[in-house]
Amino acid sequence: MEKTDNLFKRASDITKLSPVDIIKALDFRSKDTSLGRIDAVFAELRTIIFLSNLNLYNIIPLQAEKDEKSADFIATGSSDQYVIEVFCRISQFPPQTVEELKKDLETNKILIKPLTYEDDLF
């Protein structure tokens, strides 16, 4: 529970939003407690911290209009603005087989960079 609290605190410090406002901005609905949606919220919270560690600022969660898809964040770096969509691969259903994962890695469908460390994310 401490790591979850720390994740919310860091994301709140970065966005200047309360944890409740962050959850609302990330389009989390209390009635949608599917494992995939909960995984997605944690991925989005970790992304806020990751973007901040990349020296992006003004990281703003974007709330989608009703029944529409939207990017997850807008952020600024130098004089450029970026629109960011978070994709949570962990919650894939049905689960990906080892062979499928290896194929995705070989074809660069999944980009692995040494910039993410668990300490940065939690």
Image: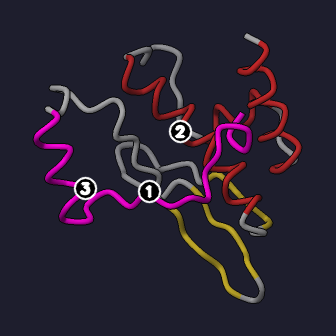
Tell me the CA gap for discs 3 and 2: 20 Å
In the rendered structure, find residue 44 and report the number of the disc placed on it: none
| Relative horizontal placement of residue 32, taking residue 46 as reference (left or right) | left
Tell me the amino acid under the disc marked 3: Leu
The picture quadrant where one finds residue 114 is bottom right
Q: Name the residue rendered at 61%, 59% in the picture.
A: 115
Tell me the amino acid under the disc marked 2: Ala
**Residue tagged by mark 1?**
70
Pick whichever of labels 1 and 2 is earlier in the sequence. Answer: 2
Camera-side mark, 1 or 2: 2
Camera-side mark, 3 or 2: 3
Q: Nearer the viewer, residue 104 or 4?
A: 104
Q: Could you say whether the residue bearing mark 2 is in a helix, strand or loop?
A: helix
Q: Could you say whether the residue bearing mark 1 is in a helix, strand or loop?
A: loop
**Residue tagged by mark 2?**
43
Disc 3 + disc 2, Cβ < 8 Å = no
Q: How dense is the environment of label 3, judged by Cα within 10 Å: few (below 14), some, or many (20 and up)? A: few
| Relative horizontal placement of residue 8, taking residue 110 as reference (left or right) | right
For the record, the magenta segment spans: 98-122
